[in-house]
Amino acid sequence: MQDISPSATSLFDTRPWRRIALSRLDPVRAVPTMLSETEQKLYYWLTRHWAAGRGAIVDLGCFAGGSTARLALGHAEAGLTTPIHAYDRFTAQARVKRRVLYPQGISPFDGEDILPLARELLRPWQAHITLHRGQIEEQHWQDGPIEILVMDAGKTAPDLDRMAQIFFPHLVPGTSLLVQQDYLQWNQPWVAVQMELLADVFVPRAHARPDTVVWECTAPVTADALARAQVEDLSDEMMLAYLELAYERFEGWNLGRRIDTLIRAMRANPGQRAAHDFSRRP
Ligand SMILES: C[S@@+](CC[C@H](N)C(=O)[O-])C[C@H]1O[C@@H](n2cnc3c(N)ncnc32)[C@H](O)[C@@H]1O
């Protein structure tokens, strides 16, 4: 069993997932994903080489199962038996089907429901996977500790707050990882703001291009911490102040330019708290 002592977390420093041959992911090639190749390797590595069966693997925003499949492949190869829970509303509009699903080999189909498709694509790993359909902010978590929490669904500030309230208290200090897939996504600056508000609880460990940042949970996420970390009602000025802190933190990671884009996006889209309302890209 791996332990996440400082020497274990330094595992991240050499970014070993980057040396994984893409062919290792051949078994999941048929499962469409929006993840970059580097992110796909990271997800696989996290369950194949880092996870040690200390809690559930949770994937918030799994779309057709792409991220879940990469996590499940590593999980299976590592011989883990912990549950994998994947959440999504499991719908895809015609535009997304055309842009993402069909170019990755899915045959054209009628309607927007992609739950049957996700079930079929994830069949090889179904023994450990539970799919949850619906709005994630309306879900509950009652399945014990979470070892890895992957987030790709905080598309609005209120949704992000609610997802944090539901899932973060089940992360285990010194053990759990939070994978923020949208951390550097230009039209979701509230993700970086929330992580600054939780700076005493999470420490960044790795960046995977283009947008993912992996965080280690280092202290319990208490009700007080969550109350302090609410982003929905922050003024633009407060949001910008926390983004400046993110800039300072990540400048040394060579990510200053990316955080600067979040800052400029926030300034260009005053008062907006939903990704789809960010119409001005800096
Ligand atoms: C960028 S996609 C996820 C991509 C996926 N992780 C992959 O590997 O391809 C974001 C997903 O989050 C889902 N989503 C966003 N907000 C949600 C919410 N509030 N409740 C449920 N699903 C949500 C969308 O339906 C979409 O499938």
Image: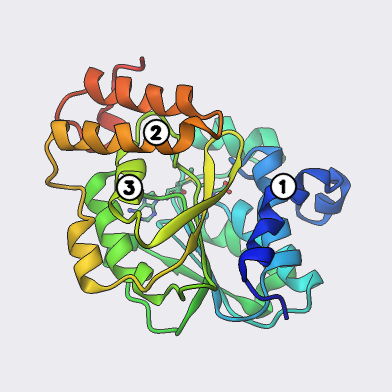
Dot 1: few (<14), some (14–19), or many (≥20) neighbours within 10 Å?
some
Which residue is denoted by mark 3 in the rendering? 196
For residue 226, side relative to residue 51 (left or right): left
Spatial CA distance of label 3 from label 1 is 23 Å
Spatial CA distance of label 3 from label 2 is 11 Å
For residue 8, side relative to residue 230 (left or right): right
Mark 3 or 1, nearer chain start: 1
For residue 100, side relative to residue 163 (left or right): right
| Front of the two marks 3 and 2 | 2
Secondary structure state at the residue bearing disc 2: helix
Secondary structure state at the residue bearing disc 3: helix
Vertical relation: 104 (above or below) 61: above
Mark 1 or 2, nearer chain start: 1
The quadrant of the picture occupied by the C terminus is top left
Residue 277 lies in quadrant? top left
Q: Amino acid at mark 2?
A: Glu
- Look at 65% across and 80% down and name the residue there: 53
Mark 3 or 2, nearer chain start: 3
- Look at 41% across and 29% down and name the residue there: 259
Q: Amino acid at mark 3?
A: Glu
User: Measured from the top left, where is residue 129 in percent x and y?
Assistant: 60, 74
Residue situated in front as seen by the camera: 259 or 46: 259
Vertical relation: 90 (above or below) 7: above
| Res 158 seen here | yes
Which residue is denoted by mark 1 in the rendering? 15
User: Measured from the top left, where is residue 146 in percent x and y?
Assistant: 49, 75
Residue 191 lies in quadrant? top left
Q: Which mark is residue 248?
A: 2
The quadrant of the picture occupied by the N terminus is bottom right
User: Measured from the top left, where is residue 83 in percent x and y?
Assistant: 58, 79
Residue situated in front as seen by the camera: 111 or 158: 158
